[in-house]
């Protein structure tokens, strides 16, 4: 895929003639992607805690997202809700599975609300859309509206999974990426890529820099996403990049630098 050259403009400070664009300093920055979908798990929002939202984590996350938006990249974000609720877990304790999944979808709205407010507090316009109707706090998910928001430079946070039980937020991420014509799904994790075994348990685990969707599906030790999500990405030739969410890594992925592992056809 050809790189997209973005012209980043350093606007004049107060006291200068803001209308004098030629006087502004500029620099050319190469980005590999123009529109991406970032997938975040709920556990990441907890920032190492067992429950809730870490203010330190979400503030750093907002800065990282704003940094790539400042390059001209259009960003949609799908958030999980595991830091509050997992439908599969609570369904083991008497709650129906479908009800538990809807509770998990509501948990993603909490994370989305926090991220939108943190982004906007840092000067980055953002909108929260959800596939569950929660009109007092979020817009309903509408594809054309989401695309228009991104074209205007707003980050679009998508909560509520797919709006259906028995479907993971990984599948929701791939679905949204396809709907919004994103060039890749960027899955942020706690490890620096995909390994043939769990690197926390096996010292000799081999890291993949790249692999096919089929390889990810066939190896039972590789848990990039659930099989439904990977299969959907494979069917539509959508790349999935798995990387460790740490300072500057998100920007490096956008610039096409060798970070994490890439799953593609």
Image (cartoon, grey):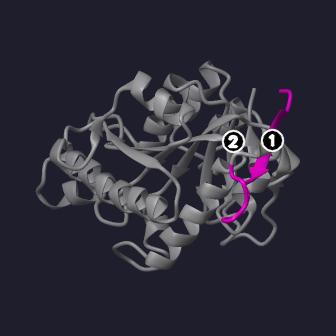
Q: Residues within 10 Å of mark 1 (few under 14, many from 20)?
A: some
Say left or right for 74 vs 46.
Answer: right
Q: Quadrant of residue 134?
A: top left
Say left or right for 209 vs 224.
Answer: right
Q: Is residue 226 visible?
A: yes
How far is the residue under mark 1 from the one under mark 2? Answer: 8 Å
**Which numbered disc, 1 or 2, marks the residue that appears first in the sequence?**
1
Residue 7 lies within the magenta run: yes
Write the residue at 43% across / 36% down. Answer: 172
Mark 2, residue position: 72
Write the residue at 45% across / 65% down. Answer: 121
Taking 74 as reference, is 50 above or below it? below
What range of the chain is rendered magenta? 1-18
Mark 1, residue position: 7
Q: Is residue 194 visible?
A: no
Q: Position of residue 61 (x, y in %)?
A: 56, 64
Q: Position of residue 78 (x, y in %)?
A: 46, 45
Q: Are marks 1 and 2 in contact (CB under 8 Å)?
A: yes
- Which SS class for mark 1? strand
Q: Quadrant of residue 256?
A: top right
């Amino acid at each position: 895929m050809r790189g997209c050259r973005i012209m980043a403009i350093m606007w004049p400070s107060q006291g200068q003639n803001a209308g004098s664009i030629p006087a502004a300093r500029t620099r050319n920055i190469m980005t590999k992607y123009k529109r991406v979908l970032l997938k975040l798990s709920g556990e990441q929002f907890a920032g190492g805690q067992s429950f809730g939202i870490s203010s330190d984590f979400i503030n750093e996350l907002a800065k990282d997202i704003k940094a790539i938006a400042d390059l001209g990249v259009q960003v949609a974000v799908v958030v999980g809700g595991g830091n509050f609720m997992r439908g599969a877990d609570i369904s083991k304790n008497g709650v129906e599975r479908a009800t538990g999944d809807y509770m998990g979808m509501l948990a993603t709205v909490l994370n989305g609300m926090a991220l939108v407010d943190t982004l906007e507090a840092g000067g980055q316009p953002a909108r929260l859309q959800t596939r569950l109707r929660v009109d007092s706090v979020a817009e309903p998910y509408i594809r054309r509206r989401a695309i228009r928001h991104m074209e205007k430079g707003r980050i679009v946070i998508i909560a509520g999974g797919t709006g259906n039980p028995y479907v993971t937020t990984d599948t929701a991420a791939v679905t949204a990426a396809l709907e919004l014509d994103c060039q890749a799904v960027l899955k942020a994790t706690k490890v620096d890529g995909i390994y043939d075994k769990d690197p926390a348990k096996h010292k000799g685990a081999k890291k993949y820099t790249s692999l096919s969707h089929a390889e990810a599906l066939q190896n039972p030790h590789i848990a990039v996403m659930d099989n439904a999500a990977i299969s959907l990405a494979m069917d539509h030739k959508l790349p999935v990049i798995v990387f460790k969410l740490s300072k500057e890594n998100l920007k490096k992925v956008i610039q096409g630098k060798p970070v994490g592992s890439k799953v593609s056809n």
